Image (tube, rainbow, N blue to C red):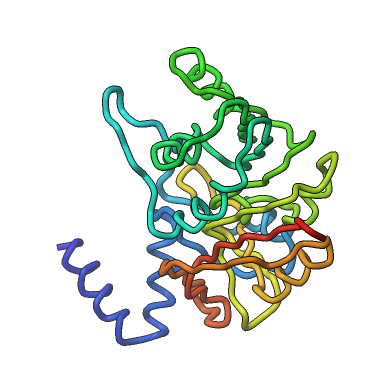
């Protein structure tokens, strides 16, 4: 009976905006991964709210991207291929890549199935300590030339790569890049929620293990701030993923974006 009630409310929500907002806010968010609610002006406001105003009914452990033993997974989607097109010609022996939020080598492993990564490329993944510990165990058990894990962002990088991680961090992309010893010549990002109606804002997302701050960028401001660092916009792409923040229609994200920026020749 309870299932029938939920099914009825879900279909009713498709036709009534107030019902849809209430459904997403009170029922969907507390138990569903990757859902959001609330809008805040700063990361710290969203952080405070995530700890006091947005409890979860169901939690899971942090998810890491590891294939079961003996199973080969090709996790790339259409949205990932523009990076391969632009990245491949840039790779040379000695190229240093900083992969922010690379999980357990998700991009490294999937990219090298499709393109040749030259000998001597240094691919450094910056992740949370729990993932770094698992990653170092992984390195002891397999062949991953040039791959390393760290929980400290810093040092030098020729190429910066981040897919789906920037929105969870307090510093913006320009602020992160300026913590490096020098600005990378090329920057690739993917799966970042953006919109063009209002300025940058923050919401709270259910990631399974907790409710956390989640930044929604303004596309024009994002590109402009990269330009202030001397980066030239080379390419951009959009996937079809949509994000709805209940009671805040101006915060709706119609697609997650990817960009390629370059300082080469500047």
Q: Is residue 224 left or right of residue 74?
A: right
| Residue that sits furthest to the top in the current view | 140
Asked where in the image residue 48 lies, by quadrant, the reply is: bottom right
The correct choice, above or below, for 19 with respect to 215 in the image is below
Q: Check the picture and name the quadrant holding the N terminus.
A: bottom left
Residue, x 40% and y 31% (percent of image)?
A: 66
Residue found 52% across the figure and 54% down from its top = 83
Q: Quadrant of residue 53?
A: bottom right
Q: Where residue 228 sits: x, y (%)?
A: 84, 66
In front here: 153 or 31? 153
Residue 91 seen in the figure: yes
Residue 202: where, in percent of width, then height?
Answer: 65, 65
Total marks placed: 0
Q: Is residue 7 left or right of residue 130?
A: left
Q: Position of residue 103 (x, y in %)?
A: 52, 36
Depth check: give the residue in front, 114 or 150: 114
Q: Residue at x 38, y 71 (%)?
A: 23
Q: Residue at x 73, y 73 (%)?
A: 221
Residue 128 seen in the figure: no
Quadrant that contains the C terminus:
bottom right
Rendering coords of residue 63 (x, y %): 44, 38
């Amino acid at each position: 009976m309870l299932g029938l009630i939920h099914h009825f409310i879900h279909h009713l929500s498709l036709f009534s905006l107030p019902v849809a907002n209430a459904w997403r806010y009170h029922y969907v968010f507390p138990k569903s991964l990757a859902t959001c609610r609330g809008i805040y002006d700063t990361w710290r406001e969203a952080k405070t709210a995530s700890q006091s105003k947005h409890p979860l009914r169901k939690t899971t452990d942090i998810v890491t991207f590891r294939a079961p033993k003996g199973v080969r997974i090709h996790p790339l989607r259409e949205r990932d291929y523009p990076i391969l097109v632009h990245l491949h010609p840039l790779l040379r022996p000695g190229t240093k890549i900083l992969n922010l939020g690379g999980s357990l080598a998700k991009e490294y492993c999937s990219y090298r199935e499709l393109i040749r990564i030259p000998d001597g490329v240094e691919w450094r993944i910056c992740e949370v300590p729990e993932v770094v510990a698992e990653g170092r165990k992984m390195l002891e058990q397999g062949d991953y030339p040039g791959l390393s894990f760290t929980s400290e962002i810093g040092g030098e990088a020729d190429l910066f790569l981040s897919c789906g991680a920037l929105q969870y961090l307090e510093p913006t992309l320009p602020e992160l890049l300026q913590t490096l010893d020098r600005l990378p010549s090329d920057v690739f990002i993917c799966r970042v929620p953006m919109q063009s109606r209002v300025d940058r804002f923050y919401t709270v997302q259910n990631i399974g293990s907790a409710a956390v701050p989640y930044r929604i960028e303004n596309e024009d401001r994002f590109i402009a701030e990269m330009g202030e660092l001397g980066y030239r916009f080379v390419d951009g792409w959009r996937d079809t993923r949509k994000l709805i923040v209940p009671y805040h229609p101006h915060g709706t994200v119609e697609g997650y974006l990817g960009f390629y920026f370059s300082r080469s020749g500047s």
